[in-house]
Every structure is written in structure tokens, then in C-alpha cells.
Amino acid sequence: MNDRVGSRDIGATRVFDPNLNGRKLTFQPDPKGIRNVQTGSRWNILGLTVEGPLKGKRLKPALHGNHFAFSWFAFKPKSAVYLP
């Protein structure tokens, strides 16, 4: 039995230090995940490079808090998200 019937994906977040081996990386959305501008490597939500020249490298997680964002978006799915 699928206990997810009727549920909706409300997303997830992770925050990482963008510096890797003394180099600050810049990231942008990609249809398959996230890519860094400098090398075009693709990253997953765990901060691991899964494709490209940096494959296998991992970013250091940063302390952050979005403690109740998941519940807000569950009840207010049309809320706007502002990005820098």
C-alpha cells in the first residue's frame, strides 16, 4: 500500500559552504539538479558531485535552520520563495 497517495512534494533544502579546495563555486539550477558555473559539474542535494570534472567531490554542510518551512509550504503551497 502506498502511504503517499494524495500527498504532494513540498521540496527540501540543504545549505553548503560553496568553497572547495580554496575555490569559491557559483551554482545555478539545472533540469537534473544543480550545476556549478565554473566547471559545469552537476551536484545532488547531499552536496556530492555526481557528474563532471569534480565528480566525487563533496561540499561541507553549513549550519542553517528552516525548521518549519516544510510545514508552511504544505499548507501554503502558493507562497513565494525569494532568492538572492
Image (cartoon, rainbow, N blue to C red):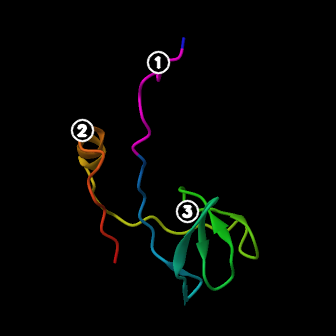
The mark lying in front, picked from 3 and 1, is 1
* Residue contact at pointers 3 and 1, CB within 8 angstroms: no
Q: Quadrant of residue 42?
A: bottom right
Closer to the camera in the image, 44 or 1: 1
Q: Quadrant of residue 82?
A: bottom left
Q: Secondary structure at mark 1?
A: loop
Closer to the camera in the image, 77 or 3: 77
* Residue highlighted by disc 2: 75
* Residue highlighted by disc 3: 47
Q: In which quadrant is the C terminus drawn?
A: bottom left
Q: Quick one: label 3 or label 1, which is nearer the N terminus?
A: 1
How far apart are the alpha carbons under marks 3 and 1?
29 Å
Residue 30 location (% of width, % of height): 60, 66
* Residue highlighted by disc 1: 3
Q: Which residues are magenta?
A: 2-10
In screen coordinates, is 49 left or right of 24? right
